[in-house]
Amino acid sequence: MKRQITLPYGSQSRTIAVPEENLAWVEGPKQAAPVPDLSEAVRSAIRNPIGSPTLGELVLKHGKKTLILVDDGTRSTPQALILPILLDELNAAGAADGDISIMVALATHRRMNRDELMARVGEAVFNRVPVGNLSQRPEDFVDLGVTALGIPIRVSRQYLESEISIAVGNIIPHMYAGWAGGAKMVQPGVSSALTTGKTHLIAGPRCYEILGKVDNPVRQEMEAIAIRSGLKFIVNVVLGASGQVAAVVAGDVVKAHRAGVEAARPIYTMELEERPDIVVASSHPADRDLWQGFKPVNNCGMVVKDGGTLILLIPAPEGIAPDHTQLVDFGTARAEEVLALVAQGKVADEVAAATYLAFDRTRRRINIILVSDGITHSEAAKIGISATTSFPEALTAAFERHGQSARIGVVTQGADIMATFVSKR
């Protein structure tokens, strides 16, 4: 007998069939009660900030020129719902719409076009205040010295020149930062590729140890950069599995973020009793390309037995890594070889190298099969993995590798999870 399981696949879904006798578990982010009134929840969080002055006090102390940092379309933050409320609160605090602009904190992601920007912030907001992408030109970043670990700090001039800066994002487990949200909108969000490459090179080889750990060296660097560069306020949401807002926090970049992490942790932590031979996972919501999909590759790969198989359902309409093509150039090189190239100054894209290091750690442990309409088998083979458009074909290959009694786990949304293992009851 087979269990029919429907998984998100980009904006659509795919239903897979898994033999009931092989199924160990089906897990993913948990449903959480949505806030009763989103507008009121956002407004209340902003008016009662955690560890921070109010918006009115910040405007009075620093001035009215405000820059709101938002994440791009690879993230699930409901910006179009949050931003109108934030703008109204800024107006009430003394900053008129003419004093406010919005920047998409792209980091090293591709620029968003006009239609994408409008969809991201909502048409009303798009027509209300200026909305633009981070300038990624080297001359548009300012040198602020180095961090305690010696990482060069280069951040956006436009961001630095604002009197009030506010970061709006969401809080989920993250393999490089421990948890997303908070200071991550500054580093990497509005930092140069130089700064981002250096922090990611610390994180990439340590992604297994960092995921879900809020106090880690990389987040400490991110927060040091955000504080030194003057980030004044954050508004972060926590989403349940259905995408509805379950909690809102606002205020200090560290203190408010930590409160949000505590709200997010039970939603995104999978408590598992068994590490299976095969894990089937949806990449959702990291669906755009495999660059985003490396999050579910690593997050879900961590819960597979050594030598096991991860089958990742990912539409990847933009391919493997269109913004970081050097990752594909590394092919199947060992991590030590890539690190040697970095040390020799032969790597132009250190962010690509860092992500490759994280990916290589998982690829060396387990077999990876993509079920994708956007990546062919020949393309996947360049980086040492397999691809097919057929889930049954992928599952058959995994059974051939591990035997017909292989145990299978299914992750419903693989990008935003972490796991703990508990004893069987």
Image (cartoon, helix red, strand yellow):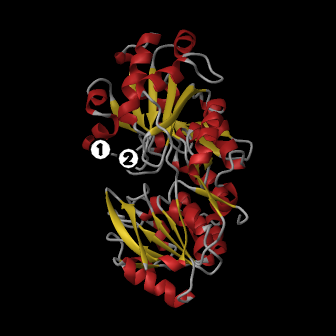
Image coordinates for residue 41, horizontal then vertical, percent? 48, 26
Residue 115 or 140: which is nearer the viewer?
Answer: 115
Residue in the image at 32% along x and 27% along y: 130
User: Is residue 112 among the parts visible in the rendering?
Assistant: yes
Name the kind of residue labelled 1 in the image.
Answer: Glu
Find numbered disc 2 in the image and state the secondary structure of the residue it sits on: loop
Residue 234 or 60: which is nearer the viewer?
Answer: 234
Image: 232 above or below 353: above
Image coordinates for residue 22, horizontal then vertical, percent? 53, 79
Residue 357 or 194: which is nearer the viewer?
Answer: 357
Q: Quadrant of residue 2?
A: bottom left
Image: 128 above or below 71: above
Q: Are marks 2 and 1 in contact (CB under 8 Å)?
A: yes
What numbered label is drawn on residue 73? 2
What numbered label is drawn on residue 116? 1
Q: Residues within 10 Å of mark 2 (few under 14, many from 20)?
A: some
Image quadrant occupied by the C terminus = bottom right
